Image: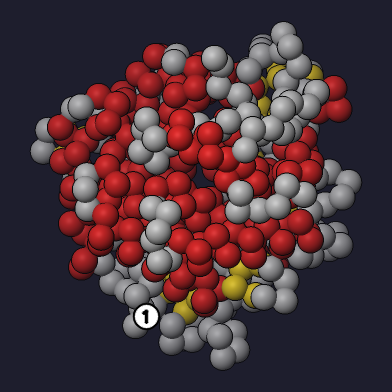
Amino acid sequence: MSHSLDPARLPRRTFLAGTLAAAAAAAVPGVATAAAPTGPRPPAGQADLSRAVIDSTMKRFTPATIGGWGYTLGLYMYGQYLCYRRTGEKKYLDFVIAWYDRFITDSGISNGFTNLDAMRSCQMLPLLYTETGVKKYKTAADQLRKRFPTYPRTADGGMFHATSKVGQLWGDGVYMAQPFLALYGKTFGDAEYCFEESAKNLAVYFKHLSEPAKGLLYHAYDEDGSESWSSGPGHHSKFHWARAIGWFGMAAIDILEVLPAGHPRRAALIDMVRFLAAGYRRYQDPATGRWYQVVDRGGDAKNWLETSASSMYTFTLARGVERGYLPASYQGVADRGYAGVLRKVTRDADGLTNVADICEGTNVGDLDFYYGRARRTNDFHGLGAFLIMNEQFTKKPH
C-alpha cells in the first residue's frame, strides 16, 4: 500500500525576486540558492520531500552499491548536494564524497571522455574542491578541461554527442558538458575560453534543433544527414522527446548562473529560455500539470506523462521567473508543474519514498520507440531532476 502526497493540500508561499537569490548564490560558484519562489510545498509537519527522497535512497544503497560512473548518478549527486547546501546535513555531503572517491584518486580520474555523457558527473568536481579544498578534485577537473580543445566538433563548433557518433548533436548533450565547462571557468579563473565555448555550444545546438512554430526542440541533428532518423534539409530527427528539451533548458539556466552580466552571449541564452518556456506553457497537460513523453502529441493513446522532464521544465520555469528572464505569469505554469510532479511521489508502508513514471535512458528513435520506453520508479534520471526542482521550491531556512 502507498500513500499519495496530495498537492491540493499544499499552501502557497511568498515569492522574493531574483537579485536577492543571485547574491546568495555567490558563496558557492554555480550553486544558486533559491530565494523562496512562489509555489506549493509540503504542509507544516510533513517531511521535507528532498530529505525524504535522499533518505530513502541512502537506505536502499551505499556509495559502493548505488552504481558506477555515469551521468544519471552525476545528476542525482548534484541534486543531493543542493539539498546539503540548504540543510547543512553533513551525511548528505559525506555520501556524495564517498561516491566520488570511488573514482577520483590523487592522480585524478581514469576516463578518456569519449562521449558527453561521461562528463556530466564532473559538474561536482569544482563544487567538491570549493567545499573541501582537496586537490584531487581539481586535478580531475583539469583533466576534463584539457580534453575540450581536442574533442571533435561539427563544422560550426558543436561537440559531437560521442566520438563514435560523428556529426551528431543530441539535445541531451549540452547539459552533460557545458555547465561543467562554465563552472570550471568561474571557479578556476579560465573564463575567456570556458564561458565562450559553453555558451557557443548551446547556440549551435539550438540553431540545429529548434522548431520555432512549436517552441520545442528536436531530439537530435546529424551533420551529413546520413542517419536513418535524419529528416529534411535540416538533418534533424522527427520528434520532440521531452527529456532532451528538459536537459537543454536546465543547461541554459545553469550557464546563466555563472555567465557575467556583460557577456555577449548572455542575451541569446535568455532568449532560449524564453523560447522554451513558451513551448512548455503551450504543451503543459491541463489536467495534470505535467508534460508528455513526446511533448506535442498528448492526444496519442500510447503517449504518457513523464516525470523527469516535467521536473526539469518546472525547475527551468521557476528559476526563469526568479531571475527575471520570464514574466511573472509563468510562475503559475511552474506551480502547476510542481503540483503535478508531487502527485507522482508516494510513500510505501515501510516509509520509503518512491517517484514514479520516469523514462529510462533513451536513444533517438521513432514514435513507437519513445512511447515504448520503460516507465521506471526511482530511476536516477527522475530522482536527480526531482531534487533539483524541489530545492528550487524549498525555502532555505534562516
Residue at 39% across, 35% down: 26
Residue at 47% across, 79% down: 222
229 displayed left or right of 372: left
In the picture as drawn, the residue positioned furthest to the left comes out as 107
Q: Height in image: 83 above or below 371?
A: above
Task: Using the rendered view, name the quadrant where residue 307 is placed.
Answer: top right
Please state the horizontal and vertical placement of residue 68, each as a whole percent of the image.
36, 37
Q: Height in image: 189 above or below 10?
A: below
373 displayed left or right of 381: right
Callout 1: few (<14), some (14-19), or many (20+) C-alpha neighbours within 10 Å? few
Please state the horizontal and vertical placement of residue 324, each as a whole percent of the image.
61, 49
Colouring used for the render: secondary structure
Q: Locate the N terminus by quadrant.
A: top right
Residue at 39% across, 48% down: 258
Task: Tell how many labels.
Answer: 1
Residue at 72% across, 76% down: 213
> Helix or strand or loop: what does disc 1 sit on?
loop
State the residue position of label 1.
156
Does any portion of residue 312 appear in the rendered image?
no
Q: Locate the C terminus by quadrant.
A: top right
396 displayed left or right of 291: left
